Amino acid sequence: MLDVKSIDLHYGAAIALRQVSIQAVPGAVTCLLGRNGVGKTSLLRAITGAHPVSAGSIEWEGEDITRLPIYERARRGIAWVPQGRDVFPLLTVRENLETGFAVLPRGQRRVPDEIFDLFPVLKTMLGRRGGDLSGGQQQQLAIARALVMKPRLIVLDEPTEGIQPSIIKDIGRVIELLRGRGEMAILLVEQYFDFAQELAQTIAVMDRGDIVLSGRREDLDEADVRRRLSV
């Protein structure tokens, strides 16, 4: 289980997170909702080790990882699919996938066939450069690259942003499949309540660096959640 306990995060003198706590467990999707600029990505940067926290603690599978660097967290099975996809534009699709090998033992460094079952379009584009793919295809590649790492926690930062509806449905189907296996914890950051509502068991809503609402999906008032997401 991921257990984030009362963390603060600063950028210089500016505070981005205040006493934020959140959990994610295998076999479930925890969705973090909020408008732009409320601290969602900062929380993911804290969890993955991309930015140090100022206070509080982060535990993963019973181990305190608060001070571990990002590569050590990746070795412990934490994969991050950042907002904007961040594929390597000059590398081929195959080479992008193979960057996920870095955290694996040598004997496991292969792209599983399952990746192409989940994202069939990638199999037809292995020799194409990442920068030549459409936005939706790049998003699929970014998720596939994370799955090559064999993660036990996958952190997805707004995977539906700027993506056509058909690919959003494909991504939702993949998340649902991964959740159903019960082996992986999934932390999903979104702005769109409808997408989150279909997938999440637990929902947390952020505003101005705080979590202002959280609970099981069925226990939350939908109108209240939507109100907190409106501009």
Image: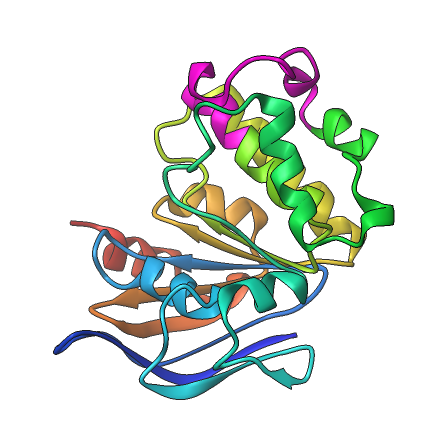
The image quadrant of residue 140 is top right
Pick out the residue farthest to the front.
106
Using the image, determine if residue 153 lies above or below residue 190.
below
> Looking at the image, how many numbered discs can be counted on the residues?
0
Image check: 221 left or right of 119?
Answer: left
Q: Nearer the viewer, residue 13 or 28?
A: 13
Residue at point 78% right, 59% down? 183
Q: Quadrant of the N terminus?
A: bottom right
Q: Quick check: can you spot residue 33? A: yes
Q: In the image, which residues are magenta?
A: 119-140
The image quarter in which residue 110 lies: top right
In the image, residue 55 sits, relative to residue 168, either above or below, namely below
Q: Is residue 173 visible?
A: no
Q: Residue furthest right?
A: 107
Relative side of 116 to 175, left or right? right
The residue nearer to you, when weighing 66 against 202, is 66
Determine the residue positioned at 41% across, 26% down: 163
- Where residue 63 appears, x then y in whole percent? 65, 84
The residue sitting at 65% across, 69% down in the picture is: 25
Of residue 83 and residue 208, the one placed in the foreground of this image is 83
Give the answer, above or below, for where 18 lies relative to 99: below
The answer to whether residue 196 is above or below residue 33 is above
State the residue at coordinates (25%, 53%).
35
